Every structure is written in C-alpha cells, then in structure tokens.
Amino acid sequence: MRVPQHLVDRRREELRSLIRRDGFLPVAEICRRLDVSEATARRDLAAVEANGHITRTYGGALADYNSAFASHDERSGRARPAKARIAEQAVARMPRTGTIFLDAGTTLQATARALTQRGDLTGLVVVTNSLAAASVLGAAKGVELHVVGGEFLNRQAALMGPRAIKALGKWSFTAAFLGGEGMDAAGISNSHASVAAFQQSVLRHAQRVFFCLDASKLGRATPHRVAGWARPTVLITDATPARLAASGIKLPPSQLLRA
Amino acid sequence: MRVPQHLVDRRREELRSLIRRDGFLPVAEICRRLDVSEATARRDLAAVEANGHITRTYGGALADYNSAFASHDERSGRARPAKARIAEQAVARMPRTGTIFLDAGTTLQATARALTQRGDLTGLVVVTNSLAAASVLGAAKGVELHVVGGEFLNRQAALMGPRAIKALGKWSFTAAFLGGEGMDAAGISNSHASVAAFQQSVLRHAQRVFFCLDASKLGRATPHRVAGWARPTVLITDATPARLAASGIKLPPSQLLRA
DNA sequence: AATTATATGATTGACTCCAATCATATAATG
DNA sequence: CATTATATGATTGGAGTCAATCATATAATT
C-alpha cells in the first residue's frame, strides 16, 4: 500500500543517519529498525545511495565518508573514473618531502588514497581539514599527518570556521591541493561561504596551488568565489581544453594538467 | 602447504592495513589482493579480528576505528557489554547544554554513540580529539561539534601533540570525559607520554572530570600517570567496589559511578 | 470523485557467503 | 633426520542476499 511521500522521505533520512551512526548496517537490521520488508529496505538503500553519503555492500550498507570506499569503482572493471586519474596527477605533483595541504571532498579523498600508494615518501608532512583524508592517510608510511581543528561541518565531513582558519596561521605549505564545486571563466567557486573563506585562507599560506576538479564542475557557477585563474593557480582536471575554452577558461600549459 | 610463520604474520599485518586504508574490504577482494583462497582469507580475517582493530561483516571486514560498529555486540543477544553501560552513565552525566570534552578510545567512542541517542539536547557543544567520536557525532542533532587539531596518532586514531594541547587553550569545559589504559591505587595512567600530556592539559580546562574505564583496566599500571584520585576526578566503571578496594582504590560515593 | 501513479510486500530463482571437513605439503621441533 | 604441528586450498551443504516480477492498497492528481 502506498504511503505518504513525507513519511518515505523521513524514513530514508533516518536510514541515512542510522547508517552514519553505526558505520555499517546489515539489511536484516534495517528491516527490524525501520519495520519494513527486505524489498523496501533495499529500495530505500538504493535511494539513499543515489543521493550519495552511503555505499552499498553485500549484505548491508556503509557510511561513505568514514569508509574511503573507493576500490569499488576501480575494481568493477570499468575505466578508472575521472577522480582517480586526477588524483594520480595530483600525487605526481607532490614533493617527496615538504608540507602540503589536502582539502576536503571526494576528489581529494581519492588523492589521499593514491598518496598511500607512493612508496618513496620520506618526510612529507600532510595537513588536512578532512576527516576522510585523515582516516585514509593515518595508515600511510612516511607521512606525518596533521589535522587542523575547527568546527565540524556535517555536510563536508570537514573542519571549518574561524578556529580552523586560525589554526592555519602557523603553517606554510609547499603546495595546496583544493577542490571546488564549480569552475567558469571567473574562476573557482563553492556553494558555502565558510568553505570558500577557509580555502582562501589556505591559499594565503601556500606557495603553489592545485585545484582538482572533474569535468562535471565545468561551467557551473556557485555563489562564493574562491580564486581566479591568475597564478599560482594550477588546474588539474579531466575536462578537454576545448571544453574548457568553450566555458571561457583559457590557461597556459603551465597552469593546466590533463588527467 | 604450510608457510613460514613470519610470512603469515606479515600477510595479516598487510591485511589489517589494507582494511584500514579502504575502510571496508570484501572477502573476494582480499583473496585477489593477498592472492590466497577464500578459506585463508576468512582465517586471516578471524585472526586479525581477534587482535582487534577490525570488525567482520557479512561479506567482508570493516576498519574498526572509523566504524563505530557497536550494534553488533548489542544485537547479538548477549548482555550489553560493559563499555556500553559505562557510556550510558557518562551520557546521563552530561549537561543538556554547555561544553564538554570527549577523549579518544573505544569506551568514549561508545559514549559518543550513546550521546546521539539523547534527543533532548539543545545547545551542547562537544569538543573532541578523536576522529571516531567526531565521525559518530557528526550526524547528531542538537550538537555543535568541534575537533581540536593536532598531529594524527595512528594508534589511537586521535589528534595529539603540542598543537593539540595549544588548541585547547581557549576552551573551557563544563565536563571532560576521558579514558585511560590502567588504574591502580596511584590513579589513572596511560602508556604513551603524548596521550598523558594531552589529557592532563584537558584536565586543566575542565570543571568536572569523568574517567571512563572498564574493569579490564583495573590494577594495570602503565608508565605515564595522568591523574590521581583527588577531586575533581570521578570514576565511571563496571568494576565492583570490592575489586576496586582490592586494588587500593578507595573512592567516596560522590566520586564513583557504577555502570 | 475518478483516475493515475507509486510505495509496499510477497515470491522466486540465481547468486554469494560461510562454517565445517578433509587431504596435503611443508614448517617447526626434537 | 624423523616426527609433529599447522597453514593451505578444495569441497560441500546450508543459509543469506539479491534483482526482477507481480498484485494490491493507497496517495497524488485531475
């Protein structure tokens, strides 16, 4: 029997938060907690997964941002997704030793994972405000990992706010690797003011800046501008130069890395 | 065919680190990466799980510290484990509004999880140095969550070091909830100097202090003393008063909460 | 009020996972 | 070197999971 939409939505919200709370939730458990049939549980899972934030596994579901669960895509035969290729480029640009900053976001999370693959690191210091990146890099050899404190933003699973900005104060980065939600002729933008403010603060402490954005962000403009295309901005993307130009983004080769 | 012990151990170490890196790893994937049969993969999983740090799920395994995966125990019929009962007591002692500190460690992780159950929170500010606690509390309603920055210690999955201590500077906690590795007549102790130093710094910023330690820590003395039994220390434990006394721990009722 | 759309639960057959058992090759032990 | 211990892979029966399909009840729409 059909059920009102708002109840469905509420139930799925609850499912998302249940999974988040427990990290992993088997399907059978979902049925019991939500008092629904297996079929509905699976349907709900599919819906929540489509909205992001969780990943299905055989027998249940996993909270995304604390899972670093990427091997799934890579494993499933298909061509390596854009994010992973971008991540590879980013890692190739990292110094063997020095201090770098790693932003929040799925592309940077992929970058963190790729970084754990590099075996030649000796004294690299990585600073991040992303819990996901931290949790991935925690196990990496040859990396000294620091997390900037701050207020936890649920949406990004990252630390932001004035305290985070202040915590950047004493750092000086050889290179910073940042994400973004949109890029157009004007530059890179984000939809949250606090995110943009934080990123701008990172920029002020970095000698070199790499923005890692996949092609889906191309031509999208979001409210808060983070940076223009002037130096030292370098863009790492899978978008073709032609499509970039079509969006009004013209960069010299030294500022564009194709992934 | 039998294989040298050191190879087995090394392989299991690698498995642990693989799981940690990916957050979740299906059995089939383990077989491929470690080039072993399913049977061996399962055996390795069981071994690693016995040593802690991971949790088995149907179809794979989950890294422990980013999973908050407790429902398993609670679900599986058995009596609620000590940690969960301690967590309950701790949460009951939290103010509805104010600022509290939450330490790293599995007991405090359980506490964080229990805290998400409380529905009556309005303006509680939670400060933590534990990624696990942060990741659990991120989804909680009515909680403003802050993470103190610092150097990431892989073993505890927490932030420590001078920067973390410094980051505590501006905070003032209504109550602090701390863990420990040992308790005896002298007080509470930890095996790592940096952990002890950090906890002591927390103490200096807290009006009330609750140490949450289960009975397995009783009588164990580890190198670095964190605090004695003088006020304002309050102990939350499942150990019986008799056994506490046997270890030389004598506390007035106001400083002892039985879980 | 009539019609359409859809959320749900039941069923089914294929697939996957798991624990137990067993034979075997090789390390560990003496 | 002889003996014991054990790590491994294969097999198997049983249980759990999944995607697809279908009938139905009820919300949404007109």
Image: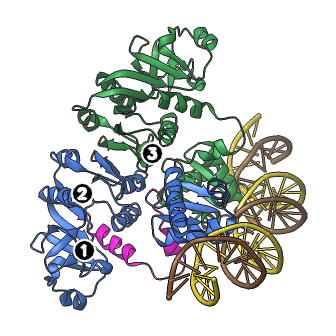
Chain colours: A green, B blue, C brown, D yellow
Q: Which residue is rendered at x = 52% and y = 34% of the image?
A: A107
Residue range (magenta) = B66-94
Q: Nearer the viewer, residue B160 or B104?
A: B160
The residue under label 2 is which amino acid type?
A: Ile
Crowding at dot 1, Cα within 10 Å, few <14 / some 14-19 / many 20+, comes out as: many
Q: Is residue B74 left or right of residue A32?
A: left
A226 on left or right of B54: left
- Quadrant location of the N terminus of chain A in the rendered image: bottom right
Would you place residue B231 above or below residue A241 in this image? below
Which residue is under mark 1?
Answer: B182
Asked whether A51 or B64 is in front, the reply is B64
Asked whether residue B90 is drawn in magenta, I would say yes
Cα separation between marks 3 and 1:
31 Å
- Given the image, what chain letter belongs to the residue carrying mark 2? B
Please state which amino acid type lies under the numbered disc 3. Ala
Q: Circle 3 — which element? A: helix
Element type where label 2 sits in the image? strand
Circle 3 is placed at which residue position?
A132
**Whole-number angstrom distance, CA of label 2 to CA of label 1:** 23 Å
| Labels 2, 1: front one | 1
Q: Quadrant of residue B181?
A: bottom left
The x, y position of residue A31, in whole percent, is 64, 65
Image vertical order of residue B165 relative to residue B251, above or below: above
Specify which label sits upstream in the sequence, 2 or 1. Answer: 2
Mark 3 burial class by Cα count in 10 Å: few <14, some 14-19, many 20+: many
Write down the chain letter for disc 3: A
Residue B180 pos. (x, y %): 26, 68
The answer to if A192 sits in the magenta stretch is no
Q: Are marks 2 and 3 on the same chain?
A: no
Spatial separation of the CA atoms under disc 2 and disc 3: 24 Å
